[in-house]
Amino acid sequence: MLKGISPMLSPELLKVLCEMGHGDTIVIADGNFPAQSMGKNAIVIRMDGHGVPEILEAILQVFPLDQYVEKPVSLMERVPGDQADVSIWKTYDKLITAAEPRGTETIQKLERFAFYEESKKAYAIIATSERSQYANVILQKGCVL
């Protein structure tokens, strides 16, 4: 255990977050996301038993969002006509606003297949047990100033 570091951040996850450089991305994926197939060229970290919000909150405590791009946070947009509950996005808004001075201005929504294409470029993918649909998040790493 480390003081001041969330126990949600395992040694493996902390190592990955430290290894990432400016502009690298990490996906925090819900339980339905095809993490293994999307992460063929990435590090896939299993965090079964945990949801996206608790992991997102822990990561945002130590992870700088890219200050040189307008939208360093990407969510998977709901497919037109799908009535899935996306109230989890309100939780993300609160967590990002608490961690980032630019708040929700940093968030963009990507069409489902565009999100998958961006995920294939990620440095790492965290596979969770999150049951909410459209709960996937991509974070782009910035610089510590």
Image (cartoon, grey):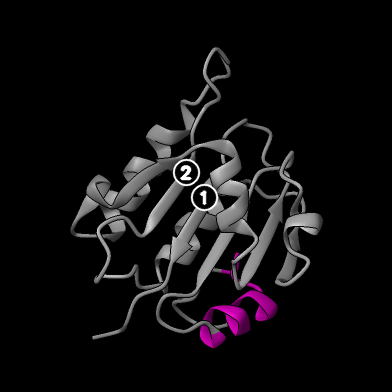
Q: Secondary structure at mark 2?
A: strand
Task: Name the kind of residue labelled 2 in the image.
Answer: Leu
Residue name at image x 50 percent, y 26 percent: 86
Mark 1–mark 2 distance (CA, rounded to whole Å): 5 Å
Q: Residues within 10 Å of mark 2 (few under 14, many from 20)?
A: many
Answer with left or right where residue 145 lies relative to residue 95: left
Residue range (magenta): 7-19
Q: Which residue is mark 1?
A: 137
The kind of secondary structure the magenta stretch mainly shows is helix
Please check the rendered image and state whether residue 60 is part of the magenta-colored stretch, yes or no.
no
Locate residue 1, reporting x and y percent.
Answer: 61, 81
Answer with left or right where residue 145 lies relative to residue 72: left
Task: Name the kind of residue labelled 1 in the image.
Answer: Val
Residue name at image x 75 percent, y 54 percent: 35
**Is 22 in front, or is 113?**
113
Q: Which residue is mark 2?
A: 75
Total marks in image: 2
Circle 1/circle 2 CB separation < 8 Å = yes
Please check the rendered image and state whether residue 12 is part of the magenta-colored stretch, yes or no.
yes
Locate residue 84, reporting x and y percent.
Answer: 58, 18
Locate residue 99, reporting x and y percent.
Answer: 30, 59
Is residue 1 in view?
A: no
* Disc assigned to residue 22: none
Q: Secondary structure at mark 1?
A: strand
Quarter-of-image position of residue 135: top right
Locate residue 45, reporting x and y percent.
Answer: 73, 67
Q: Relative to 7, does residue 132 appear above or below in the rendering?
A: above
Q: Earlier in the sequence, mark 1 or mark 2?
A: 2
